[in-house]
Amino acid sequence: MKKAVVTLMSLSMIFTATACSSGTSSNPSGGATTAPTTTTTPSATVSASKDPVKLRMAWWGGQARHDYTLKVIEMYEKSHPNVKIEAEYAAFDDYWKKLAPQAAANQLPDIIQMDISYLTQYGGRNQLADLTPFTKNKILNVDDVSPNAVSGGQVGGKLVAMNLGVNALTSIMDFEMLKKANITPPEKNWTWSDMDAITAKAKAAGKITGGFRDDVFFPYYLRTLGQKMYNAEGTALGYTDDKLFVDYFNRSQKYYDAGSVLALDKAAQKKGTPEDDELTLGNSISSNGWSNQFIGLATASKRELVLQPMPGPDANKGLFLKPSMYWSIASSSKQQEEAAKFIDFWINDIEANKIIKGERGVPVASKVKEALKPLLSPNEIKVFDYVAWAEKNSAPMDPPNPVGSIEIEKLLKDTAEKIMYKKMTVQEGATSFRKEATAILDKNKK
């Protein structure tokens, strides 16, 4: 998950898009930045080992996420005085630009925040350690985590990532802004036609609408129509009728030509943080992304925001519960067991999760979810409730994207930009995208 159109990214449906990725949320409000002085779970007991351990740990997100993650690290280091964790932090786009050369040089951080879009790329190249041995010997205890949540981190039969939480797609809206513009807020079961009308009225009132990150929302649109981005084997595109591409991008072009979404040159300057979002800045009525982004946006904007389901019809077919993000361990790490101990602490320690409060997705450990419920702020309750609603109004998630999908996502972005800039027609874009995407998938077939 990532920028909000770009980024939709959690507590995901009671515990969820990110994520734009997206992965640009910040820390929860209401006491989530104060580290408790005691812990209650076995993982928090003082480490018996005296050998010094140094771990590098990398993640993306906004400043608030950075702040609370450092507090959790401090808590862990206090109970494990032989362990020192070196933090590496960046906004979503910069994070992956930094990680790629580290991977090429076999110098990945020990603990890596991982996104589902990159899971096959890194896991399929054996750059991520198999966590299965650590789950079997209980160093990474998943007894309190559902098998479905655990399996979401598997690639090629190996558990290469630990799910940190679930989220769902949402259109985060400022209903008061809508009312001031004489726009009736949408119902839960709204449609693309409703969005068209709201977008036009918002533009007339001097407001834009949150754009759509195409690598996230084009697959969503396909799912609402019973189609998929990729076939089951990951060897070809899953939809055969290019009219679906044409219909989706005709709407995008209509919004862009009307000035109803942020111009591409301005969007390129965005950092992908909640503080930088057009909704936070008061210029947009919405920010489309993942439910875990809500806390960061609500905290940064200091306004009443609403988690609105995505438009349909058949939004329940398009919506799914998605691992918000993961912790992975580099296969090159010389401290894999110590890294696994920290991940266990993150997902199972109740006191640590009183700081995290599901900002990276609704926690996967049931005991943590139950312990947090009485402590949630009003905004956090909104996310939990939305994820709970989505759990009952969604379809199963697609398999992880195939190898080559990152190239295809870039291709989709480049094609969309050419369409918006009128360098090609939508039909030409559909034909060109299919041809080049097929070539990428063919190249990566085993």
Image: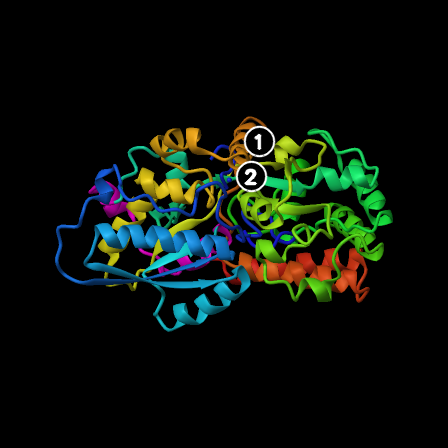
Please state, as top left, top right, bottom left or bottom right, where the C terminus lies in the image: bottom left
Secondary-structure class at tag 2: loop
In the rendered image, residue 121 lying in the magenta stretch gets the answer yes
Q: Which circle marks residue 394 in the picture?
A: 1
Residue under numbered circle 2: 168
Q: For the residue marked with disc 1, what is the amino acid?
A: Ser
Q: Alpha-carbon neighbours of circle 1 within 10 Å: few (<14), some, or many (≥20)?
A: some
Q: Estimate the x, y position of residue 181 in percent, counting from the top left.
A: 82, 41
Q: Which circle marks residue 103 in the picture?
A: none
Farthest residue in the right direction? 204
Q: Estimate the x, y position of residue 77 in percent, counting from the top left.
A: 26, 55
Horizontal placement of 5 versus 382: left or right?
Answer: right
Q: Is residue 366 above or below residue 222?
A: above
Q: Estimate the x, y position of residue 130 in percent, counting from the top left.
A: 30, 51
Which region shows up in magenta? Answer: 116-139
Q: Estimate the x, y position of residue 399 in percent, counting from the top left.
A: 49, 43
